[in-house]
Each structure stands twice: as structure tokens, then as C-alpha cells.
Amino acid sequence: MPNTFGKLFTISTWGESHGGGVGVVVDGCPPSLPLSEEEIQVELDRRRPGQSDIVTPRNEADQVQILSGIYEGRTTGTPISMMVFNKDARPGAYEEMKTKFRPSHADFTYHEKYGYRNPEGGGRSSARETIGRVAAGAIAKKILELAVGVETIAYVRQVQDLAMPESSSVTREAIEANAVRCPDQEVAAKMIELIKTVRSEGDSVGGVIECRIRNLPVGLGEPVFDRFEADLAKAMLSLPATKGFEVGSGFAGVSLKGSQHNDPFEIRDGKVRTTKNHSGGVQGGITNGEDVLFRIAFKPTATILQAQATVDTDGQETELAARGRHDPCVLPRAVPIVEAMANLVTLDHYMRQQAQNRLFLFDQS
Amino acid sequence: MPNTFGKLFTISTWGESHGGGVGVVVDGCPPSLPLSEEEIQVELDRRRPGQSDIVTPRNEADQVQILSGIYEGRTTGTPISMMVFNKDARPGAYEEMKTKFRPSHADFTYHEKYGYRNPEGGGRSSARETIGRVAAGAIAKKILELAVGVETIAYVRQVQDLAMPESSSVTREAIEANAVRCPDQEVAAKMIELIKTVRSEGDSVGGVIECRIRNLPVGLGEPVFDRFEADLAKAMLSLPATKGFEVGSGFAGVSLKGSQHNDPFEIRDGKVRTTKNHSGGVQGGITNGEDVLFRIAFKPTATILQAQATVDTDGQETELAARGRHDPCVLPRAVPIVEAMANLVTLDHYMRQQAQNRLFLFDQS
Amino acid sequence: MPNTFGKLFTISTWGESHGGGVGVVVDGCPPSLPLSEEEIQVELDRRRPGQSDIVTPRNEADQVQILSGIYEGRTTGTPISMMVFNKDARPGAYEEMKTKFRPSHADFTYHEKYGYRNPEGGGRSSARETIGRVAAGAIAKKILELAVGVETIAYVRQVQDLAMPESSSVTREAIEANAVRCPDQEVAAKMIELIKTVRSEGDSVGGVIECRIRNLPVGLGEPVFDRFEADLAKAMLSLPATKGFEVGSGFAGVSLKGSQHNDPFEIRDGKVRTTKNHSGGVQGGITNGEDVLFRIAFKPTATILQAQATVDTDGQETELAARGRHDPCVLPRAVPIVEAMANLVTLDHYMRQQAQNRLFLFDQS
Amino acid sequence: MPNTFGKLFTISTWGESHGGGVGVVVDGCPPSLPLSEEEIQVELDRRRPGQSDIVTPRNEADQVQILSGIYEGRTTGTPISMMVFNKDARPGAYEEMKTKFRPSHADFTYHEKYGYRNPEGGGRSSARETIGRVAAGAIAKKILELAVGVETIAYVRQVQDLAMPESSSVTREAIEANAVRCPDQEVAAKMIELIKTVRSEGDSVGGVIECRIRNLPVGLGEPVFDRFEADLAKAMLSLPATKGFEVGSGFAGVSLKGSQHNDPFEIRDGKVRTTKNHSGGVQGGITNGEDVLFRIAFKPTATILQAQATVDTDGQETELAARGRHDPCVLPRAVPIVEAMANLVTLDHYMRQQAQNRLFLFDQS
């Protein structure tokens, strides 16, 4: 089931960039949750094209329709099918790409993997696939906020070499206060300028998104394979354009000695806490009650408006200069996608933890 | 199934540090493969304690027994059960840890997750669990080498701030030529010295392991969730002490523009190849025929022989000074574990690719 | 994933009787298969309401739309999303059922399971859910016929106590030659008469569907849990109104001694064959090359137009007389559904068998 | 994962008849459950060979060892590995079967499926595989009895044509009061005589086992594919020698009209109950609070001591007369296996139900 994610709260996405539409089926959702299309739409609007002047101008309202699983405004526990029709498809714009492989795109690998592919707008490899993830993630987010009190926020920490300083007090408001979704408004302004410059050169940039999950219960994550951070890593590396994932101290942590890196325990406000958080909120693959903190590296957008060397489907070397609409930097629109994936992982692990370890309370006397 | 990994070639590990033993059940293995305990043992010997003077002196031969799935020296296609008995267990050494949580270990999180735990040697959170992975990985490795021609090598690229330069021509022989498993012999000598110094201080260090998968067919990896690099990321972050994963250009790649980062295609030796490999061998989640190249950040070992602040199971602040045997640097022994996980991911994806996309050859005329 | 079926060729259905529609997402489909909506529609037309005068008169064209996974008439290997809009919904007809539980329906159990449900037309428990199965099964059928040569036929063997004699030479044409889908035309005529009589009494009848899978390769089915007949049993018992499953000699076989029941082997046309087929085409859970032959018991339709004792959502005893449209006998429309499930099980097992046991041909010398 | 069963409470079995042993890994078990080898052994003793004079005389104590997942007498929530060594193996007795396929056994199908097999005692197809199921089932049984109050009992209802009348008041004591495990002592005596007669003829008989699950909560079972009875059907048809499954009215129910078959609701002892139980305790795939009642058809044992026609691995027709030890009737020893599978299905569904539908109680105002 290559297009399904999750164990108990599962999502299955479908659709292509220029087919009829894209969608998702959510299975395993708890019943009786109040849910409306408007709530889903809020998150989709954060990822939709055309939302600001630093993202792709492709004109898609990305209006979601809920096709099943809701009755009179509440979930019924049965599959929730949601979809968005593709509107502003321009298949003609992709004529050249039927035969020429775009460098660092998935054209060549899809061609070889399947032997047959939909080349329009990248087909299934288009980031439009993430619409389904964001729609499903909006449900997970609501459950986590309503029933568990978890808050997940992601933000652009770095664009190319422009980085904001570390901060544990980032707010949603600060993130949404600018088009690039960096909560440091000064750095954000510079990032926006950089993105515009790069776009004017027909080029692109990447960066780093940081995500923080607050108020998590202790105990989420399965030791061994399905560690909380392992499932986060998979979730994040499953997003287009990602090249790296780190949690807590990450790659920088290798410069420290154990005596510096370890997080001593203390009692704070009556709870077992660590005095710092090099662990990034996970120990032995299980959440320890601190913020789960991780970062994802996004490469510069592969689509650029410059001529590039490539080969075609006949095995001939040739050149390709992309036309058409694209994001000079994917990070601003990737922020809600990262949050969606983080919420999906968190809810799934919450349900798994409850199912195995909280249902049965055997007398320990 | 929190203790199972893989979709078609699956492994399920079991066991604790100081219980009866540790083991693994491999399911889905192709039949007729010649297989002996000696072949499995070769890989286990590379991860076993006591193999050199820079690893833990715990004395475990880690002698594997194959309990099922083999008949007269060949696999039968039925589950292969393998186990290793624990020998040099010293439960008494862990008396203090029954009540005091070791900082940056999994004691606290297991305690909270399950409400009840085996504290001896970390119980299930012990790195002895990886014995099962290495035993299973040895089978995957043999199949991949024999039937597909794939070669997977991992090596220590960096210890604390000591790093070897990039090299695409690393050999197994160079890796195994020293105790730290860094193929650059000069850098290796410095790393060994560093590890000894750190150990003498009762401290520990981390580092970076790099892994290279050579001669992969084009087309492995499922687009969307089960991307080849996403499954590698999960596999690697599921290993104890890991804090980060990056593929190809990784985190450093964010400093480049798209025009610098993109990998142009060319025809080389009659094949579609890229002129460089910022992609790390994967595009759109699918292998493109270049080496798959990734790096994993390992934190410094949490066990150190210095007093540390912590709390106990009664919620009282206290102090703990570890005794007992441990690795001052886990990287040398982690090398075969990384290879094992990489081989497991690769074989599983190879089988998935064949099952969906190579079985049926519909006439395309 | 309670709404997903299959391991490699998987289907996930969604939708309710009176919601927006019903649909299915097929994942893992091989690429390059020529596929049109018309081919899917052929099977849907065999299950749709209103097709004859012995089935429910609900007027649904059940026109399928393929939303993804096809490009220019061929599958791309990506998820195939298909849906059918509900047209002739009459939610008003179900007002009484919001509070009164229909006997031997799923109203009460859904109410208790989820605490909240869509009562219109049975919501998710409606047999309209099987539209997705039939649509997906049509794809499996095409692959099996085109690439493997398998033929699956189901037919009504018995209605109440009217049964046709055993026959191994049943043809599709004979099955489709009458409204009840019994290949024995004389018995069929009596069955039709019986169904009409029962309907005129406001009552209903059940019966037995038999299914025969011809020309199967030897070797399908996983020993132990995923035996071929075990997966068939699950598939069939997952259909509404089913109460029993038997393969080969079935329940009648218990009257025989081993010496009578065993199927001796012989060589026939150069192949290893059995002289009879009490085994029903499976031995040790694995197909042996004979026809796989099984029967399913369907209870009489629960919806009847007679007053029945029941209770309501307030826990009061009351009475309910169903109105509205229903099938007096579900078997004629269940025939294509049984075939669909049989084809889904068969294709999935075919792919599993190839993936594990046919990819790698190790030298046995 | 062909050798794994269950979604949340999962078991993976391994081993062959004459290999080193047989075993099981249980994953997902709740922590803190008191558990000893003795408790497991009680169930294994009910299935072991040599327990009476109507079963196979193979001398196996089937002494279980728990290798992991227990600490100081309680489960830790980590995998529970259990195994039994094979003792009384007589590989020499199977020399002839290396080349001659036993009729109605799995020799031929394994040979063709895998191309290579362990012929000793049937290898993996031996019923010794069920030791792992019984050991795992004993844990499920304990949890269900202790924490949910469920009682599962199976018994021999019929041997060949000797059947006991229907009874809802069967007790464990009555079942265990005789060697054949039929709670009707008079019928049991005749069954035992029949089995002895048949054995003296070198022949075998089959029969029907009935199973009753009492005191189940309402709401277990996932509508659509994972219906409670569908998962039971799969579980039972995955047992060696089974040919049929029916729930509630089963195949006999097809003779009734809907007005006779439907189970009216009433209020009894303050609860919603049905006045009879043709449904067999499930409606729409979900338990309704009545006893779940089902029957399984077992064919006569395939191993008989009479000469039978067969073919050999060279494709030559030949004859085979089994020697060695076997059960003339598998039903007495199958009773604890049926109970084990029923308990595994029930616990798994209980955990699934709680995880999705009982964790989150959204305000419905």
C-alpha cells in the first residue's frame, strides 16, 4: 500500500497534478468529532498556490469536498473521503516534458519505474499530492488540540544562508504574519527579498523548516522500529524536495561530549523534566514530555527558468528550459504540510499508545 | 506490530539485554538460498562487544543459532528464526538503575510508557536488540549481492569534529583495516586516539556514519509515502543514539541555488546518468541508478562514568554515576548495523518493485 | 485500516448509502494495463439495482467515474480512484429508522459501536459499499484473464430449498441467461417464481452461491495464516448477509472416511492432477491446479415488509414495519460481488507468490 | 508477512515438525499482566500428542519456554518470544515422502510453490505449527477473562455422522470430562468408540467443532472487510484440515424465510437483546451482545494406513502406504486450537474497538 500512511489513523492519497483531481481517504477516525469543510479549508488555504507574491501563481482555489464519513456535522467513524478538483490545469504547457526529463525531477525515475507515466505537471509526483495530506492533517490537528491539548507549529527557520536564531517561544501569529512564514519578522523580510531576487534570476532556493510539537504526553512512540522520531523522519522525508531530517541536537550534536550532550533530569512543577533538550523531546524513541523539536532540509526547487542539460526518452542528450508556473522557494507553502504530517504521526502514536498501554490496568499488587 | 520492519521481506525482533536472549524472525525470504550460520556470524562478529580495545569489554560471543526455515543448507521460504543467548549478563550491576533514571537513556520513558519495565541493562532498549537486525540483514545482503549485484558499505565519516574528506572510492577492505571503521587510515588513527582519550575521562563522543549503496537498479522506492530515502530515514532513525539523517546534498544543500543543485542528465556508457549526485541517488523517492549516499548523526553515548543529576522513581532529585561496561563511542559497532538496515530496506523495495511493476508486461502497442 | 483489503493489490472503499456517493481507491495496480470506464461499468451493471423484476427497484445508474491513475487509456501504477454518485436517495424514507433498530440489520450494532451513526439507508452498512469492490474487482479480473488466463465464475446454486445439481461445466452464458443467475435454466425458472411469491408476501429468502476459479497456477496461497481458502473465507464472510463458507467437500465431507475423502494423485496430460476434487483445489492452503470451488450461504434479506418486534434508541420495546425498496433475495446481485472478491483474493495471492517465490532463481546445483 | 496474524495483538509463528523447534512471537501485549510458563503449559497440554489413547502416540512433552517480554512474572509490553523444542523427531520415517506426494497433504503444493521443501513430518505444514497459536492464545484468553470477562469454549459437536444435540449451557468441565472433548458424555462415548474402530481399520474420520464466545461486549468487529465473523472465518480456515465455517444459522439458515430468520429485539434485564440468535451474535459484522456461535468442518485426517495412488517428484505414478504416527481424528486436539484462534481474534478486535471508538469522548451537545 505505497500510498497509505499510518497504522490506526490512516490516510490514503490519490490523484495527479492534471488528472481529475486529488484526494484522500481517512480511515480509523474516531466518531462524534464535529467537522466541517470550512475547518479543512483553513489549512488548505495555507498551502494553496497563488496565496502570496512569492509562491507559484497557478490559480487553484483548492476547494475541498467531503464525500463521506460525516453525518449532520459529525464524524461517524467510517472512512472520510475528501477531494479537490484540479481547475487551472494546462496540460499543453508540458508537451516538451513528455520526452525530455527535467533534471532533479521524478520524470526519469517514474519513466523507468513504471514504464508508463502521466507527464502532465509531473503527474503523481506533483506536490499537489500533498493536498490530501493537509486535509487529513487538519482532522488530526483538531483531535489533538481538542482532546489531548497538543499544539504543533512549523516555521521557516532558514532560507539559503539566511537563518533566524533559535527560539522556543514562537507563536502561530508570528509565523502567519508574513508571506514566508518565518516568525522572526526582520529575518522574514530579508528572506522574502532573497526569494524575489532569486526568482528574477529564474533560479530557486531551499532552506530549513523547524517544527515544534508542544504539550505532548510522555510515552508516545514505539521502541525499536516505530520510534517517534523515526516515524517523523519518514513522514518528513516523504515530502517532495526534502534532503534531511534532524531531531534535537541533530548533526551539530556530534561535536559535543556525552557529559555536555546528556539532558539531566530534575523535578519542575512537580513533574520529571530535563534541564535542557538536546534529546529533542524523545528518549529511546519515546516522548519524554519536552517539546519535540526537529528540522527538515529542503533543497532548492528543481524547476528553474534556465536552460539545463538533459536527455530525452530516446536516450539522446538535449537541453530543456522550463516554462510554466512554479515556486522559487517551496518552504512557505511546505509549512502547513510539515504540520500536517507531524499531526498525523502524533495522533497515530497517541492512539497506538492508548490501545496497548492504557486500556488494561492490571492490579500490580 | 511495533517490533516488525518491512513489507515483503520482514523482520520481527525480540529480546532484552539480560533476559534469556535476543532473536529475530525473518518472514518472506525467497526459497532455495544457500545459507549457513557461519555467514550470519560474520556480520554479528562485526557488531559484537569486545572485538577491539575501543569498544565495550562486555564478553559476548553472540553465537547465532538458526532454529527454522533452513533445510539441508538452503532456505525453504518459511520463517527463519534466529537467536543468540545472552551470556555475560550482570544483572546486579544495574541495581541502582532500578530506581534512578539514567539521563538521556530510555529508563524514564519506558517507565512512563509501560508502567512496568525490565531495568537490567536497559531491557528492551538495549542495543543488543540490533543483533536481530544484523542477523536478518546478513540474509538480505547475500540475496542482494548474489541476485542483484548490489553492494552496500557504511563507514565512520566523522568522530566528534574529526572528519575524513569525501570519497566515492571507499572499499570494504579499507573500512575493516582499523578498529574504528573509517576508511581513511590517517584520520582513523586520530579517531582511535580521541576515543581512548575520551574514555579515559569517563566521557563519550558521537559522530557521523556515511553509507553508500552501489549498483542499485533504477526504479526502487514507492513515490509518496514509502520513498526510498524516507524508508532509509526511518530505518536509520530507528537505531539507538541517532539524531539525524541526510541524503545526497543534505543540510549543506540548502546553501545552493537550484541551478547549482540540480543534477543534469547525460548519456554515459549508454545509460542515462547524472553528471553529479546532489540527489544522492534518489529522485522523487525513486532510485535513479547513481549511488545512494546518506549520512547519519549519532549522539555521544549516553552512558558516561561521571556523576549526573537525575531523579528516581519516587520523584526525588538525586545523582547517578554509571558503572559497568559501555562503548565510549558507538560508531565502530554501528557500521554493520547501518549496513544491515540499508540492505533490509533495499531488498524489500526491490521485491516490491518487481511485484508491482515487473510481473505483468502488457502489450503497449 | 478496517476499510482496506489486500496486501499487494489493495482496495480501500468509502461511502454511504445516502451520502454523496460511494467509491474505492485501488493501490498497487500494475502499470500499462489498458483500462476504460466502460469495462468497469460492465460489472457494475451486473450488480446495480433495477436490472430485473426480481431485484430492488431503487433507480441507480451507478455510473462509474475514474478520477486518477489512468493516463490516455492505460494504468500508470499510481492509485486508481473510482466513484459513483448516489442519485435516487430518499432520506425521508428512513425517518422511522433513526430511532427504531431494524431486526437483523446493523442499526443497533453501529449505534453501540460508534455512539453516532448515519441512519439513512443503513449508512455505511448498506450493500452500496460493495460498488467499490465490484469496480476494483473488474480490474483484477482483467489482469487475471489477460495475463494469467484465470477464469472466475459464480452462480446461484440454491434459493431456499431449490437447488441445482452439481456441475463442473457451467458457463458464463448460462449464468447470465436468466435474472436469478442460476446456470440451470429449469431450476432458475422455479427460483424466479419462488422469489416473486416471497416478495408478494412481503417476505424474503436466502440461498447458496457457488464460485469456481478455473485455470489457476499451482502454488497460490500462503501456508499458515493467509491460506488461499482462509483469505477467500474472509472475503466472502465480509459480504453483507453471509452466514457460511465451505470449500471442496465442505460440511458434507465430514461424513466421509479419510480413505474416501483423500484425492489420489495421477498424471494427466503430463501434469500432476488429482482424480477427484474433495480438496476444492487447495491443499495445505495452497492451490494445487484443480478448480478452486467454494460455496457461500446467504441468509434471507433482513428487510421484510411485515411488522416486527424491536426496540428504539430510548430502550423502549416497539414495532417496525419496513417500507421502501429492497431485494427479496440478494443472491442474483451478489453473484458479481462474489466474483469480484474472488478475483481480488486471487490476484493478490498471485502477486505475493511471484514476489517471494519466483523472482530469485538461485542455482540449486 | 504470511506467518503473522492480528493487527494490534499480533502473533508470528515459526518452525517445522522436525526442525529445532516451533515458536511464536507475540507483539503488542499490554504490560503488567501476570504471566507464567505454567499458565501457557495448561493450554499446550490440551493440544499435545500422546494425551489420550485416541490421539497420535508421538511423544512430545511440548514444554514451553518464555524467552523474552516477561520480567519478574509480569509482561513488559515488549515482544513475548516463546518456543518448544522438538524432541521425538524421527526423520528417517519420512524417507519415502521425500519423493512421493502424500494424497490430500501439502507435499505437492509446497513442492511446487517453493521449489524446495523440508519433507520431514510435513515440515512447516505440520500441525505442530499450531503450538505457537495455542501458546499465544493462552495469553489472549487470560487478558479476556481477567479484564473483559469473556469466556470462550469450543467442543466437538460431531464426529462423522455422530452429532450431539444443540445446547447453550455447555461447560468447560463437561468438555474436558472425556478424551474426545464432546460435552455430551453419551455421545462422547460413541465418538470414542468410532474413532477407535476407524483407527483399527487404518482409516480416519472428521467432524464438526462448535465454538461459543460468551459475555462479549457489544461493538466488536469492523464493518466492511474486518467483520468479526470474517476474521473468525479466516482464523478457522487457516487451521489444518478445515473445509468450512458457519456462524449462527449458517448453511441451514438458507431454508428459512426472512420473517423466520430475523432476530427480533427486546429489552431483557435492562439490555437490548434478541429473542433468538440466528445471527450468531453478529449483525453487520459487529457483535450484538449475544453469544457468538460458530461451527467449523474438519475433514478426515489425510494420513491413513492404507495404500493410496499417488505420483512422485519425478512425475511417475506410484503408490504410498503411510507409516508412522498420526491422529485418526484431529478434532479432540483441535479444540484448544480453535479456542486459541477465537481468543486471538476477540482480543485484537477488542483493542481495535477501544482504540478508535472509546478513547475520545467528544461532547455531543
Image (cartoon, coloured by chain):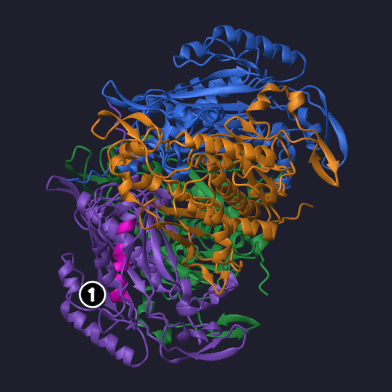
Chain colours: A purple, B green, C orange, D blue
- Picture coordinates of residue A340, whole percent (x, y): 31, 63
Q: In which quarter of the image is residue D195?
A: top right
Q: Give me the chain letter of mark 1.
A: A
Magenta region, residue range: A331-344
Give the SS element for disc 1.
loop
Residue shown at 21% from the left, 70% from the top = A166
Amino acid of disc 1: Arg
Q: In this view, does D335 lie to the left or right of B269?
A: left
Residue bearing the label numbered 1: A181
Q: In the shown orientation, is residue B98 left or right of residue D287?
A: left
Please provide percent x and percent y for residue A360: 31, 33
Nearest to the observer: residue C266 or residue B1: C266
Q: Quadrant of residue B354?
A: bottom right
Dominant secondary structure (helix, strand or loop) of the stretch shown in magenta = helix
Residue C314 higher or lower than C118, as above or below: above
In front of the other: B202 or C201: C201
Is residue C249 shown above or below B56?
above
A120, B11: nearer the viewer: A120
